[in-house]
Amino acid sequence: MDDEYDAVIVGAGPAGSHTARFAAEGGAKVLIIEKRQEVGSPIRCAEGAARRSLEEAEVIINPKWVSGEMDGAMMIAPNGNFLVVDEARAGNEVGYVVERDLFDQDLAKVAVQRGAELALKCACTGLLKDENGKICGVKINHMGEEKEIRSKLVIGADGHESMIGRWTGLAPKLEKNDIISGLQYRMTNLDINHKFVQFFLTSKYAPGGYIWIFPKDENTANVGIGIVLSKITHKGHLKELLDGWIASQPKIAQGDIIEIVGGGIPVGTPLDSNVMDGLMLVGDAGRQTDPITGGGIGNGCRAARICGKTIAAAVKANDFSKEFLQIYETGWREILEERLYRNWMAKEACLNLDDDVFNKIITTLDEVGIEEVNVFNLLVVIKEKHPELVEKFQDLI
Amino acid sequence: MIVVDPRICLHCAQCVGTCPHMALELNDMHIEVNENCKSCKWCVISCPVGALTLEA
């Protein structure tokens, strides 16, 4: 490890490593720091990623981390009626189920092969500022040793719990409606359709969220729940809900748990700014997760590609100002912001829907059919048959 | 005072991201509570497995 870099990237998740790859490819001297001993572990993810998003992000698809290619998605109403959406119509919602630990490790490997440096057991403990208060590097603890690393750019890719976002004030605290708490079991000995991801709408077991099944193989799947913090009333409530739902589903209840995964997802509005002089936020740290699906891999990688290229351009121009970093800011907002904001509004409107409404929505969509599933199209279709259901969503249509 | 039960904790850092006061940190594989804690219990309810408790 040197004392000085063009960019220090905090966090070796997909967004951090993918950023590092494009920065290194563009000739920048990059260091990724990761506080854990191993990239990708522990997993904190449902492991779904849209094929289209990964392709657009120029992620190099490696069969090693693809555990399944889905034929589509199913949305299941509380009364058991369901809507099947094939992959072509599922838009950005389905595609791959990945081995997330291998995925993260592969992206980190590619970044390092392209010239980035990776330091493990290396935590960022603070930001360095020059005499004018401008960010000029990071304080780190590397294998117990306190050090200072100078860098022209610092990239916060430190996840939903981002300290970089908080230290800089770019990512303010979230409201309870804007935090998803997630719990998931890897289960086997299940009786499932392993070619479809499944989303269960149920206000009894997943108020202000949903329950998912993401298949890993013929009889193994990630079975999880994610709901907003405002709907969680007491300690251990989330686990009670997931366990209760599983007990109510004989084909799932017959299975066995082989892994437990927890995690948080930010589902607030996009930040006012993801950049300041000498610093950018990307991925979950940059609040780029989809507020409806909770998906973060595809969006994070798409933004990371732009972030990495911006680093390389900034190094060439020797300009690390907030103004120059607008290349990233306008670039990622162009491809993600409108959808993030619309889905945030839809999420707000969906929080209090009851089972009767979920039943009507799924039945209507199944009868009418839908070209491509996204929030906008869903609302338009529902409006035709049940205008009363979408009154709250008028602003979105 | 927030106490984290290491026998239950999944190290997912849900509580760290949730805390409105920056009172929690994930240092390698354990959660630490600092003096910023206001006992608001957001972390207690946010924990997917109920590993956190507010003790008097």
Image: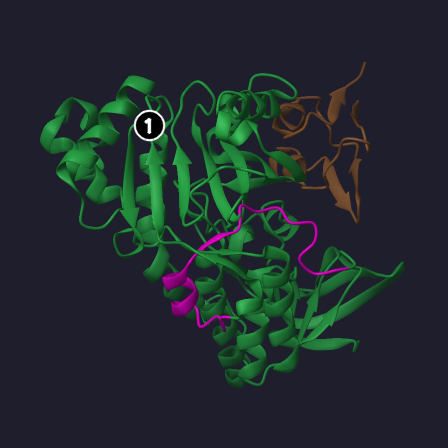
Using the image as rendered, state which of residue A315 and residue A234 is in the foreground.
A234
On screen, residue A376 above or below B39: below
Residue A127 highlighted magenta (yes or no): no
Residue furthest toward the left?
A: A384
**Residue position marked by numbered label 1 in the rendering:** A77
Q: Quadrant of residue A362?
A: top left
Question: Left or right: where does residue A240 sit relative to residue A287?
Answer: right
Using the image as rendered, state which of residue A395 and residue A135 is in the foreground.
A395
Secondary element under disc 1, as helix, strand or loop, is loop
Q: Can residue A279 be seen in this view?
A: no
Q: Can residue A233 be seen in this view?
A: yes
Q: Which chain is brown?
A: B
Question: Left or right: where does residue B23 sit relative to residue A166?
Answer: right
Using the image as rendered, state which of residue A371 and residue A176 is in the foreground.
A371
Q: The green chain is which one?
A: A
Give the quadrant of the N terminus of chain A.
bottom right
Q: Where is residue A253 in the image (x, y as percent from the top left)?
A: 55, 27
| Neighbour tally class for label 1: few under 14, some 14-19, many 20 plus, Cα within 10 Å | many
Residue located 53% across and 26% down the image: A246
On screen, residue A298 above or below A27: above
* SS assignment for the magenta stretch, majority: loop
Q: Range of the magenta residues?
A: A38-61
Query: Which coloring applies here?
Result: by chain
Residue located 25% across and 52% down the image: A89
